[in-house]
Amino acid sequence: MHCDVAIVGGGLGGTTLASLLKKYAPSLDVCIFEKEAFPRDHVGESQLPPTSAVLHEMGVWDKVEAAGFPIKLGASYTWGKTTEPWVFGFIPESETGDISRPGAYDGWRKRVAFQVDRSLYDAILLEHTKSLGVRVSQPSRVSSVQYSTQRQDKRVEQLTLESGEEVTARYYVDASGNAAVLRRQLGIEVEIPTLLKNVAFWDYWTAQHLNQDLLEKGTARVMIRSVGFGWIWYIVLSEHRTSVGVVCNAEYFKACGLKPEALYHQTLSSHTQISSLLQMAQATGTVSTTTDWSYVAKESCGENWFLVGESLGFADPILAAGLTLTHTCAEHCAYTILDLERGIKDSQWLRDQYHATQSRRVRQHMKFAEYWYSANGLFTDVLDNCAVIAAQSGLNLSPQDAFRWLSHGGIDDIPGQFVIGGLGLSGVKSVQKRFSHAEAGDVVYFIDGMNTFDLDIDGAVRESMANPKSGEVILVPVLVRNESRLPLTGYFLQVFTILQQHRYIEEIVAALQRWITQSIQDPMGRKHAWNLSLQCLETLVAQRWVRASCTPGRHVLSMKTPDEGEIVYTERTGPARLR
């Protein structure tokens, strides 16, 4: 059997890749080899907003929307310094509009996500690839990978299926998740650049109207509840079905002496809110187990092969980034292959950018997860472990220093915006207030009280970075200096351009307002653009691309992080409406 692109794995990484290849190059012969028969349950049900954009690009968003999965508005946490549940949202609740289903991919729906039942979701995506002309073999396990070691770079020559059939292709892609069929047989090593080593246990619970009170007009939030040694997730999949899991430190699990089933059920029964929700529900009775050890492959592509999704890397699930990292990684892989086919861009640059971008994104989320864990004062049974994580990360938990540390790794999840773990900068700062800092007032903006802003790009080197978009890998100029990267695109480019012409805040504000008014018609969009622009300015100062100072006699910029806001707020009191 021969094809142009052979994909190992029919999960969301493989189907995203296949759909985008067929969308932009219908003549390509694309084959998927999936070892399991669908439908089947799979852990990882919670998305972040960038996933919706990829689904729309694939042409499958309407099909996913029609399935009626709950619309995810954010998450509800007990984490930090209080057991009082607090919320972070993707958008202010005041900006949600028509919630009738099925809805259109438009307006506020572009900035939220889904909570998906993977047994249905993965099947929808796989059927979509078939409708585009992808050849799917299922169930069809890849038993061996033949490759040549005569070259400096490993070259895959053939796949052999469990049936004995042999498959050759021009490109081979490992989208097999943690099984990492291609990666393991090629002998690609992984790095574990973090001390976060957790194990997870989960099962699925059902009951009539189980989640009726948690679903408000089809919208929901992931529930994360801290316990002394770890945390519980409660992910609403429908009115009647829920994914419930327990995550704990691997050393704690080893020391507790309990079997996974015993620890799982003991933890759920000991938590008042979770046990109350599940009081009338039935579990499947099969508690699944996995190690949630973060890792990243030392190589992610070669002459004719690529790793996608969890075969390339995995970050702790506390930020619910797994689905999004896989979808966006597969998108980048598809556009890299398409550009290799066109033969216009430098092939080595395309491969280098794929590896650098995708491994950096996994590492960014590891970094944020380290901060998230080490700042949780509710981990009473594993405080020593959290302290070691913080110390090994070089993480000073003063809010200002912590943000400066974080900002060096989180500015290009969406090129040209500050986004990490599904949060923009203002969300990150609001979350910091909930963590174990002495005073909420410690969380401040570097630009607060300032009025003079001077660019400082001395010593910076101009390079190019990849921005996968609309079927190709676009070259984006980027300034690089030590750990800092400044992508000259999106809101960063606009702020950078204005700072080349103006240095005083009155002039900067006026120029931003003119640009936003001219380029964006929607009032909600203008508000979003204004917030992102100021967040970019704050990040530029934190990373020392801009020097902020106060010139006497001029108006100053006032930036505050409220105790209760529209994005982050105490669940019991609800969002605070802000001017």
Image (cartoon, rainbow, N blue to C red):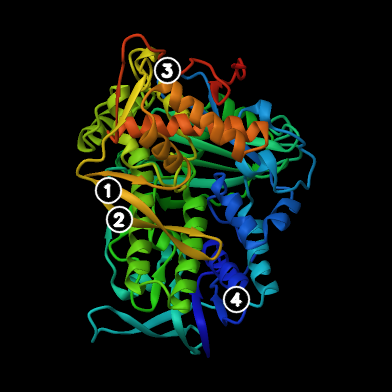
Q: Position of residue 494 (x, y in %)?
A: 45, 40
Nearest the viewer among 497 and 327 is: 497
| Disc ID at residue 39 | none
Residue under circle 1?
Answer: 480
Residue at the disc numbered 3? 557
Percent across and percent down for residue 531 are 52, 29
Q: Residues within 10 Å of mark 1 (few under 14, many from 20)?
A: some
Quick check: marks 3 and 1 in contact, CB under 8 Å?
no
Asked if disc 1 and disc 2 are in contact, CB closer than 8 Å, the reply is: yes
Looking at the rendered structure, the secondary structure element under dot 3 is loop
Report whether 238 appears left or right of 351: right
Amino acid identity at mark 3: Leu
Q: Earlier in the sequence, mark 2 or mark 4?
A: 4
Q: Is 339 situated above or below 485?
A: below
**Label located before the other in sequence (3 or 1):** 1
Circles 1 and 4: CB distance less than 8 Å? no
Residue at mark 3 to residue at mark 1: CA–CA distance = 28 Å
Residue 446 visible somewhere in the drawing: no
**Circle 2 sits in a helix, a strand or a loop, which is it?**
strand
Left or right: 248 in relation to 234:
left
Counting residues from the start of the chain, the first of labels 1 and 4 encountered is 4
> Which amino acid is tagged 2?
Glu
